[in-house]
Amino acid sequence: MIRIGLTARVSLLLVAVAAGANAQAHAADHDASMERLGAVHFPTSCKPAVAPSFDRAVALLHSFEFGASIRAFTQVLDTDSTCAMAQWGIALSRWSNPTAPSLRTTAQLQPGRAAAAAARRLSVHATARERAYIAAVTELYADVEQRDQRARIMAYERAMAVLVAAQPADTEAKIFYAIALVASASPTDKSYANQLKAGAILEPIWAQQPDHPGLAHYIIHTYDYPALAGRAEAAAQRYAQIAPSVAHAMHMPSHTFTRVGLWKESVETNLRSVALARESASIAEALHASDYAVYAYLQMRRDSAAKSILDELPMLAKRFEVNAVTGAAPGWAGVFALAAIPARYALERRDWAAAARLVPAPSAFPYTEAMVYFARALGASHTGDLLVAQADADSLAAISRRLAASGESYWAEQVAIQALCAKAWLEHARQQDSDALVHMQEAAAREDATEKSAVTPGPLAPARELLGDLLMELQRPQAALAAYRTTLAKEPNRYRSVEGARRAAAATGDRAAEAAYAAQLRRMVGA
């Protein structure tokens, strides 16, 4: 029912988004009044003259346009150098995406830490409410040498809860508290307690402030889980219309579209995001949206369209590097996409030879390198290059240990799952099938126990889908069918799992199920 309802109404969204995006793309450089970021009002004690600029900066922050929001808050300071809340805004912008599980290094934290310290110094000019905001953001940067990141995130969430209790009429405090709840949620909590609490805060406020960008945006993030995705339907329809000047707002509906398997709609909104992001030189955003678009194209078997995006990566990578050198700090999502897109293109098409030829690129984010080792390990096992497969499986295990030692527990577990998958398929290639099955089942169970990061539309190859593939090779189609069906409950309309289920159903003699999956595939590819 969720998918039907969303499909029926999403075409209206895409028409409206297209009109808004096209108009904005042509007019933005000529008329600032055409900028559409949504409606935000954040009262402060700063000079009245900066109020519109401050509201604009907060609107950009709510849409995760962090570079633009930092520049906007800095412009506020140019007019009112005593505005403590402008430094608060810079500090929160410097933290970047609160839902990202990656650790911020000490060097990365320094600019935000400096802004938080500046906000504290200026707080003599601030109200008690504003000092509470500043105290909360300071928790993200406090004692970074002694306290781990999760402890600081939890402290920030608690400080925002205190602020909300002290300022019950402050809807902005409630909104920032809600996304803090999502940020602090454990990826292994399948009750989704924090997310449901956040949704209960955001939805009533959105009913009162329907043009607020943060509300629609955060509702999508709050419900970006298979079990909750239907709750984001209205936000997915509206966010791009609320803030059509923002590339991230164009992209975010695709989070919900991906969770419910609406591939055409995901492609269309991501391509608009890419166009806006390129125009504004937000290259990390362009790469991020490109990864989601490639994933969707591949589910529809539109391989040539996916290849056209793949072919443009060198150009985007060059612009991405320029941004980094000039201090634009395009972000880790771009590094992730540059690694993920070629790996996806090979694995989704089961082009094992191409996967085996991939070359990992060193980065500050080892889990991005791991994606390439993972794809290459699978490719090497399938093409019989077992020495390379062994080396890549060893590299994955080493990266997982390195991530764990550095405190990157989330990504350490994701890479550990990849290492188990690589090991299982290497064992299968060596005809050690009992060991292969044990390790593949462990990988699937561990992946079931966690959640994907917001940076990715989905795993390069879901562990339980790979388990289904292994079971088919072991001539156990009934068990394989169960594995594919479990994958589809989490990843609806995923081509490889639907096709696997069709093959498994055929092998079991279930002609009705085989026909149903064949019909589903035809709908997905538009045949």
Image (spheres, rainbow, N blue to C red):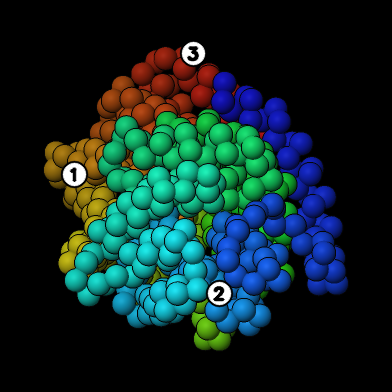
Label 2 SS:
loop
User: In screen coordinates, is 272 left or right of 91?
Assistant: right
- Residue 308 position in % (x across, y down): 65, 61
User: In screen coordinates, is 242 left or right of 407?
Assistant: right
Residue under label 3: 512
**Relative to the observer, which residue lies in front, 336 or 378?**
336
Residue under label 2: 83
- Residue 89 position in % (x across, y down): 52, 68
Kind of residue at badge 1: His
Label 3 SS:
helix
**Relative to the observer, which residue lies in front, 373 or 27?**
27
Q: Residue at point 47% right, 58% down?
A: 129
Q: How far apart are the two marked residues, 3 and 2, measured between alpha carbons?
A: 67 Å
Kind of residue at badge 3: Ala
Residue under label 1: 439
Residue 126 appears in the rendering: yes
**Relative to the observer, which residue lies in front, 196 or 18?**
196
Q: Residue at point 79% right, 52% down?
A: 20
Marks 3 & 1, CB-CB < 8 Å contact: no
Q: State which tag comes first along the sequence, 3 or 2.
A: 2
Q: State which tag comes first along the sequence, 3 or 1.
A: 1
Classed neighbour count for the residue bearing mark 1: other residues with Cα under 10 Å, few (<14), some (14–19), many (≥20): many
Q: Quadrant of the N terminus?
A: top right
Label 1 SS:
helix
Q: State which tag comes first along the sequence, 1 or 2.
A: 2
- Residue 374 position in % (x across, y down): 33, 58
Q: Residue at point 36% right, 29% down?
A: 486
